């Protein structure tokens, strides 16, 4: 098991290294002729009005929160699914109840209009 | 060991014997073999992507009654490699007012987040990187870091179009990643294990025949994750110019391009592992 994780650590370093190395080589090979017009932000010929780093709607934040909720739900469901064959009936029903409770939460969020992209 | 029957094990054993013969310690030997194997696998993935770009251009051209690339090499097969060499010599324009670290980290993260998944994919019974006992969780969790690359690109570019496009892309990705992850529970439930190798060997029948709905949900969610045809509102040209990668040029843009195709290839591989494998035919 430790073997596998050490391989994964090495592979993560490699997969970060390959694009970094490619971009570094390209930055040596490519010409560098910057000028103010070329470096300006692309906005179809217009000057940017105000700061580009704006604050976004709070609705989006609730959206992400619902996503987080369901992702955590899935983390709880994985061990339940992996051990499904050895589970007693009680545990299976418990899992279904768990899903139903979260389904109620989803219906509530739906009714509140969180899933709408405005 | 027959070389033609299983070349991977043959070469791995040869490298092992060679390094032990040189007097390398077991830990060092493991480190070197992991490094070589990882490099070959990652480079192979990148090469497959250049081929995939050629295939896509060729197929799209045929659909639109054109020839597509047909100059470089037979049937234009080396067109992507020519493009790759050329893109290295293109200027990397850094717009003024960018946030340096997110802007430069984003293309690296976009490729790395997809490439990392290749560490756990079981290609054959002997040829795989690592057989994690939480393999599917690893695929899902590390695959989701691609969203981080997109939001960094949109935020770091100091442009309102890219910021809006990044928000839209991430909204689409996270909303489809929930059904994506839920549908992976079905193969886990059948196989009784989270390890990808066990899921493959548990398939006497293709899981897509046992659970066609889960397979369909997984496939459609993957289409949305990759941003392909019916879900390509991430790069709506008429509204958002080009999407979150608007301010990138040269190889930094190329990295996003590679990441997109690599994501498509990886999603297809994961789909094949979860739903279309035949454990008995692979001699497991």
Image (cartoon, coloured by chain):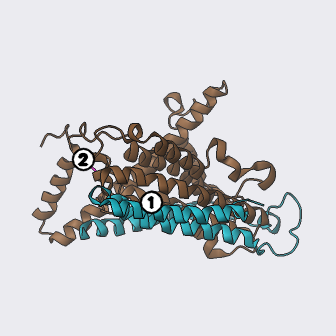
Chain colours: A cyan, B brown
Magenta part, dominant SS:
loop
Q: Quadrant of the C terminus of chain B?
A: top left
User: Circles 2 and 1: CB distance less than 8 Å?
Assistant: no
- Residue at the far top: name it: B65
Locate residue A90 relative to residue B30 in the image: left or right.
Answer: right
Locate residue B82 relative to residue B39 in the image: left or right.
Answer: right
**Is B127 contained in the magenta span?**
yes
Residue A104 appears in which quarter of the rendering? bottom right
- The secondary element bearing badge 1 is classed as helix
Report the number of discs.
2
Q: Nearer the viewer, residue B195 or A105?
A: A105
**Is A70 contained in the magenta span?**
no
Q: Nearer the viewer, residue A26 or B188?
A: B188
Read off the residue under disc 1: A96
**In the rendering, at what x and y percent does residue A56 appear?**
76, 72
Read off the residue under disc 2: B125
User: Residue B238 got which mark?
Assistant: none
What's drawn in magenta, residue-wise?
A: B124-128
Locate residue B1 relative to residue B131 in the image: left or right.
Answer: left
């Amino acid at each position: 098991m430790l073997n596998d994780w050490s391989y994964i650590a090495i592979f993560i370093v490699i997969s970060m290294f390959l694009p970094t190395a490619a971009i570094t080589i390209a930055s040596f090979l490519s010409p560098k002729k910057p000028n103010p017009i070329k470096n300006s932000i692309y906005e179809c010929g217009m000057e940017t009005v105000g700061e580009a780093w704006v604050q976004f709607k709070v609705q989006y934040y609730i959206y992400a929160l619902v996503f987080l909720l369901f992702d955590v739900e899935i983390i709880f469901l994985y061990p339940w699914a992996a051990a499904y064959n050895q589970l007693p009936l009680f545990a299976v029903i418990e899992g279904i109840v768990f899903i139903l409770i979260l389904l109620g939460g989803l219906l509530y969020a739906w009714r509140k209009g969180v899933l709408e992209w405005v | 060991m027959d070389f033609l029957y299983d070349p991977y094990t043959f070469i791995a054993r040869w490298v092992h014997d060679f390094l032990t013969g040189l007097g390398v310690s077991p830990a060092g030997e493991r480190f070197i073999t992991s490094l070589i194997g990882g490099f070959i696998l990652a480079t192979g993935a990148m090469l497959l992507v250049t081929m995939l770009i050629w295939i896509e251009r060729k197929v799209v051209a045929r659909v639109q009654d054109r020839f597509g690339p047909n100059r470089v090499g037979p049937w234009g097969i080396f067109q992507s490699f020519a493009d790759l060499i050329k893109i290295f010599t293109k200027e990397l324009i850094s717009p003024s007012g960018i946030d340096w670290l997110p802007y430069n980290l984003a293309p690296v993260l976009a490729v790395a987040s997809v490439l990392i998944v290749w560490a756990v994919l079981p290609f054959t019974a002997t040829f795989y990187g690592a057989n994690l006992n939480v393999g599917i969780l690893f695929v899902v969790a590390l695959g989701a870091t691609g969203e981080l690359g997109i939001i960094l690109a949109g935020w770091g570019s100091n442009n309102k179009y890219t910021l809006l496009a990044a928000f839209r892309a991430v909204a689409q990705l996270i909303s489809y990643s929930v059904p994506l992850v839920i549908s992976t529970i079905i193969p886990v439930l059948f196989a009784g294990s989270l390890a990808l190798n066990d899921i493959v060997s548990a398939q006497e029948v293709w899981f897509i025949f046992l659970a066609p709905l889960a397979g369909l949900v997984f496939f459609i969610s993957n289409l949305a994750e990759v941003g392909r045809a019916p879900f390509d509102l991430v790069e709506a040209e008429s509204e958002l110019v080009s999407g979150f990668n608007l301010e990138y040029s040269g190889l930094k843009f190329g990295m996003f391009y590679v990441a997109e195709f690599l994501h498509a290839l990886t999603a297809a591989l994961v789909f094949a592992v979860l739903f279309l494998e035949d454990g008995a035919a692979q001699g497991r």
